[in-house]
Amino acid sequence: MPTKYIVILGSMMSGLGKGVVTSSLLKLLDLYGYSALPMKFDGYLNYDCGTMNPYRHGEVFVLDDKSEVDMDFGIYERFLDKDLTGDLSITGGKLFGSVIAKERKGEYLGVDVQIIPHLTNEAIGMIEKVERTRKPDVIIIEVGGTVGDIENSYFIEAVRQLALRHPTVFINLTYAPSLEVVGEQKTKPAQVGFRLLLQSGIRPNFVVCRSEDSLTEKARQKLALFANIEENRVIDDSDTRTIYGLPLHFIEQGFDRLLMKDLGFSRKINRKRLEEWKGSVNRILNPKKSVEIAIVGKYTGLRDSYVSVKEALIHAGSKLDAGVKIKWIESDGLEKGDANEKLDGIGGLIVPGGFGKRGIEGMIKAIEYARENNIPFLGLCLGMQCMTIEYARDVCGLKDANSTEFEKNAKDKVIYLLPSQRGVDRKGGTMRLGLWHCKLSRNSVSYRLYGKEKIGERHRHRYEFNNKYAGVMEKNGLVIAGTTLDKKLVEFIEWPKGFGVGTQAHPELRSRLTGPAPLFLGLVSAALKKKSEKV
């Protein structure tokens, strides 16, 4: 069976949730028993998003194969429950770089290199290579940005040409704002988006409409009229309490059946797996218990900077039938004020990853508060490094302990630059990235949570625990719970009492609704237990 294509394009504005729509369709196809792969185009000229500021672009998501990709890949993996690879990510930087490299090699001798056909052919070639090598039933292509952007115009032309070669379904994601002063949903901006799409030579097969409230019949009729489609092909995507409920909302509207018909598919949905998904969603919406977890980070002003941490807590909560309320705390604020006041009453604490000196002392104060008050704690990457510094200072008596990232000439360099990083002079794609394996100590909390000795988690860092200080730290009670297989690098540390775990890895990146990350399960479980003991 030849691979079919679904292309999702946004109009009007960015941030409407193309990634969630794409992921919901991946889930639907999976529930129908079809193999599906996502691809994402981003128009920026960066080769990847590894050097981007989280405040501008949100979280940098890392794959097993070391690729640093758009945060939407995290949503894809969480819905599809499948590890993805970097060749599914296409950027303007990759496309232009590939075309220029070919021109320098002389592959275009005798012709002037142009956007059409050379750049568009390059895009089509990258897409068709995935089809040839993976042979999925469906490839869903999410086009970043909005219709009308210069940055994605050549890629939209490429998918128009792709549809001439392969069976393709086009879906337009748009928005119908509700204005209180007029009391109705307005469709005029969406109509403008339709015209831009039609001018590009693309007629949508479906329109998915974001809105605050359920789509009204009047708005649906207008959208259908100006998009040249039947009314039942205008799909409501109004605000939901959890993104994991969107596939179910699509099913309620019959979107899944129409889509399968357009793709020429005839299988029935897997009812058992559908009910399992419904059960997970219901536990998110109607939990029997609740607990509050604080996230003390450097980028809490933009929650998308820590989206995988947030989702991993949701996954753990669903598994444990508990609602997890997140208390976001900017670490800068803890440096200036009373940490006890802001952290009082929390059930657990997470210090996530990040880079740079800003806010570090606030993180260390939060960790000290958690350790002294026996509050369950999880340190992720930078969080583990801050956990190390705090323990060295406050338990081991090394008052000048620090990381060379923050204090180059620190007296006690308990965290230092990885030896493999010392000759690196480029920023992009040069950190310790991707899936790395670790051996856990059998008498550790981490081993109990994972249930096995050898594990693999994704990494993204340049600095590491300095083994020179392992002896004094262990002598004062710190547990070195996991190391790399060659025992050269410390990967997991633990407090001797209570639940306090730090890992150099990013376990949140492999957490799924159907398979929560073990450390997050451990943290939420410990927080729930502590809460029940207080009652």
Image (cartoon, rainbow, N blue to C red):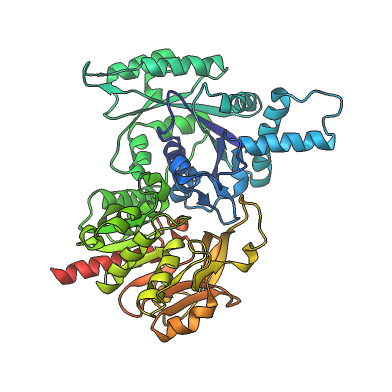
Q: Which quadrant holds the C terminus?
A: bottom left
Image side of residue 343 versus residue 129, left or right: left
**x, y percent for residue 522:** 34, 68
Q: In terms of image quadrants, where is residue 2?
A: top right
Q: Residue drawn 42% across and 82% down? A: 443
Image side of residue 479 versus residue 264, left or right: left
Q: Is residue 268 visible?
A: no
Q: Residue drawn 40% across and 69% down? A: 387
**x, y percent for residue 378:** 37, 65
Image side of residue 449 versus residue 265, left or right: left
Q: Residue drawn 45% across and 35% down? A: 18
For this rendering, which residue is in front, 256 or 470?
470
For this rendering, which residue is in front, 221 or 19?
19
**x, y percent for residue 195:** 48, 14
Asked if residue 70 is positioned above or below residue 487 in the image, the reply reads: above
Which residue, as the protein is rendered here, is positioned at the far right?
Answer: 110
Q: In terms of image quadrants, where is residue 180?
A: top left
